[in-house]
Image: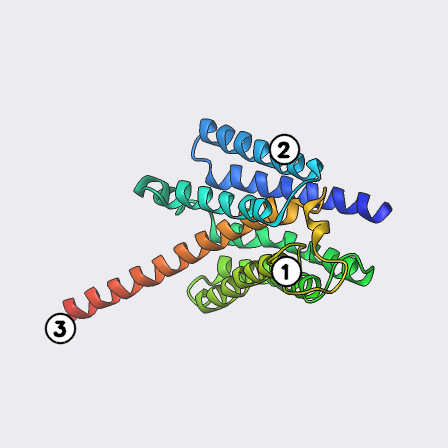
Amino acid sequence: MTFDLLSTIGLTASAAVAVAVFVALFGSSLTSRISIGAAMTLWFIGVLALGASGNIGTPLLGAAVLVPIVVLSVVGFGSSVARGRLQSPPLPELIALNVIRLLGVLFVLLYAAKRLPAPFAPVAGWGDIAAGAAAVPIALWVARQPQTARSAVLFWNSFGLADLVTAVTLGALSAPGPSRVFFDDPGSGLMTSVPWILIPCFLVPSLMFVHLVVFYRTLRVSAADRKNSLMTTGATL
């Protein structure tokens, strides 16, 4: 009970950090900050209500993971104005948000307690720990030497996004139902209950969107640098 209580506090705090970062970095005005905060708060409450309902099948859980990612992507990348706003947040702060993934240790502890199965829990847990532990050094590198850090950012970002996709996939394939592939007990059904549902249905979509923004920012800068280099070379010739 103490473990679950501490986990609830940790996951709620992580969700609050994610909301605060989104509000601070993606809000271009007071109105937009209030809108982002309100929307994410309602999302958070909806996820908790879904987990408390106690009747969540794999299709519904999958929709609760995928729909927020689609909505965030459409809102964030769907117009030139929105894409322009994605250029404003400091890249180091977006990367540093992933430090909350150190809570991946919860997966490792749940696996040790035989409350979550392999390969889902160990892969998700250690992957999150690795991505979270590397987030701050990568962010500091970007802040101090953005040009030399580009390759490291792309590698870390690829690993971090792949880890989230792998974790969601393994969780779905370990859940009770016709799509189950991994039959080690106890299955991944725990992830549909409070507070654990906050991970796949709130934190994962939020962090996936951040990874997409980091890719967009980093690759866009790379393309711009190559264009400038070609223009400079042409002018010299």
Q: Which residue occupies 81% across, 63% down?
A: 112
Residue occupied by mark 2: 45
Q: Which mark is residue 180?
A: 1
- Residue 195 pos. (x, y %): 72, 43
Distance from disc 2 to disc 3, alpha carbons, whole Å, reads 61 Å
Q: Which residue occupies 83% across, 59% down?
A: 113
Q: Which color scheme is applied?
A: rainbow
- Tell me which corner region of the image, top left, top right, bottom left or bottom right, holds residue 132: bottom right
Q: Which residue occupies 41% across, 46% down?
A: 86
Q: Which residue occupies 45% across, 31% down?
A: 32
- Residue 164 pos. (x, y %): 57, 58
Q: Nearer the viewer, mark 1 or mark 3?
A: 1
Residue 76 vs 137, above or below: the answer is: above
In this view of the protein, which residue sits in the foreground, 39 or 178? 178
- Secondary structure at badge 1 equals loop
Look at the numbered discs 1 and 3 and tell me whether their residues touch, using CB distance below 8 Å.
no
What amino acid is at disc 1?
Arg
- Tell me which corner region of the image, top left, top right, bottom left or bottom right, holds residue 233: bottom left
What amino acid is at disc 2?
Ile
Q: Nearer the viewer, mark 1 or mark 2?
A: 1
**Name of the residue lying farthest toward the bottom:** 237
Sequence-first tag of 2 and 3: 2
* Mark 1 Cα shell of 10 Å, populated few (<14), some (14-19), many (≥20): some
Sequence-first tag of 1 and 2: 2
- Secondary structure at badge 2 equals helix
Residue occupied by mark 3: 237
Sequence-first tag of 1 and 3: 1
- Secondary structure at badge 3 equals loop
Residue 45 vs 200, above or below: the answer is: above
The quadrant in which the N terminus is found is top right
